[in-house]
Image (cartoon, helix red, strand yellow):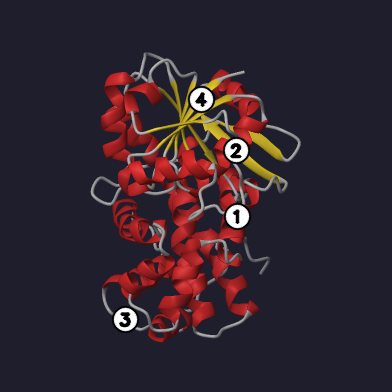
Amino acid sequence: MADISIIGAGSWGTALAALLHRNGHKITIWSIMKEEIEMLRTNHEHTEKLPGVKLPEEMEFTTDLEAAVRGKDVLVLAVPSPFTRSTAKSMAPFVEEGQMIVNVAKGIEETTLMTLSQIIEEEIPQADVAVLSGPSHAEEVGKGIPTTIVVGAGNKKTAEYLQNVFMNEVFRVYISPDVLGIELGAALKNVVALAAGIADGLGYGDNTKAALITRGIAEIARLGTAMGGKWETFGGLTGIGDLIVTCASMHSRNRRAGILIGKGYTMEAAMKEVKMVVEGVYSAKAAMGLAEKYNVQLPIIEQVNEVLFHEKSAAEAVGSLMLRDKKIENPLIPWPK
């Protein structure tokens, strides 16, 4: 049994808390919001973000960050990506040398273009940092629906330990050393999911969705490999797998926000309607910053930025994509003649 704290009581953190408790671990959930902790203590259920998933009586809930961090075997960092740096900075004084932190949020910091694990390592250099990602909606994981996921870590022993901590008969865990590729796939798929939702909001069909998913993973892999990620990662669970589930499901807050934008909502109005952090909005600008830095073309992600931040209509953005210069689908395949 491991002593584990979940830092962040949103839907994903709560679902993982339920999963880890079922695996026999001692679980504490921390939130900065007193009213959220009181709700969890009273109802043993996150009635707003994860209704129907009951948490056991013996689970602990706290707003005391020091108590949540000190002496724990594993810290699962599950705050939304815009709050990763500030939360890590607050945690740093209480983290011991070699203490494991598993980041489960997805995003890229707009101002620095850093991945979330890079931020955590910068703020908490004494920690042993890993990531967990893959096609996994909190609503389904909380209910025990079969799911596969990947733990990424630079240290194989850390990855294997976490594999044992998280894995059970309905939650299959693979391991990988490609932390950068995992995080880039996780962050950038949210931007493509916004595009998929916008297409849905415009009334387009399966042909359009398939095109966005296929060309979207091409963009993600193009940038990711230029930055040092591995192609195999983008063809796996944390690349194409996570992209499919996020583009296709109404559980996806990014797709839901995109649908509203496609119907004419502004970005701000769509985020307000979804009532949760839409990670793709925060990663979209960062993706274009990385594209410029590494001299990589990201036409779908570029048009998402135009719609989000430059008042371009969704229909015009689709037209810009469809009427781009003629291309070869895969220039690496040679012509026989």
Q: Residue at x 46, y 19 (%)?
A: 72
Work out how far the residue at label 4 is from the one at label 1, CA to CA, in angstroms: 30 Å
Could you say which disc has been placed on residue 240 in the image?
1
Q: Is residue 216 above or below residue 209?
A: above
Q: Position of residue 54 (x, y in %)?
A: 61, 44
Image point (44%, 45%), residue name:
39
Q: Position of residue 114 (x, y in %)?
A: 32, 42
Q: Secondary structure at mark 2?
A: helix
Q: Which residue is mark 4?
A: 4
Label 2 – label 1 distance at C-alpha: 27 Å
Marked residue nearer the N-terminal end (4 or 2): 4
Residue 18's disc is 2
Circles 2, 1 touching at the beta carbon (< 8 Å): no
State which tag comes first along the sequence, 3 or 4: 4
Q: Amino acid at mark 4?
A: Ile
Label 1: few (<14), some (14–19) or many (≥20) C-alpha neighbours in 10 Å? many
Q: Amino acid at mark 3?
A: Lys
Q: Position of residue 262 (x, y in %)?
A: 44, 80
Location of residue 234 with respect to 125 vertically, above or below: below
Q: Are marks 4 and 2 in contact (CB under 8 Å)?
A: no
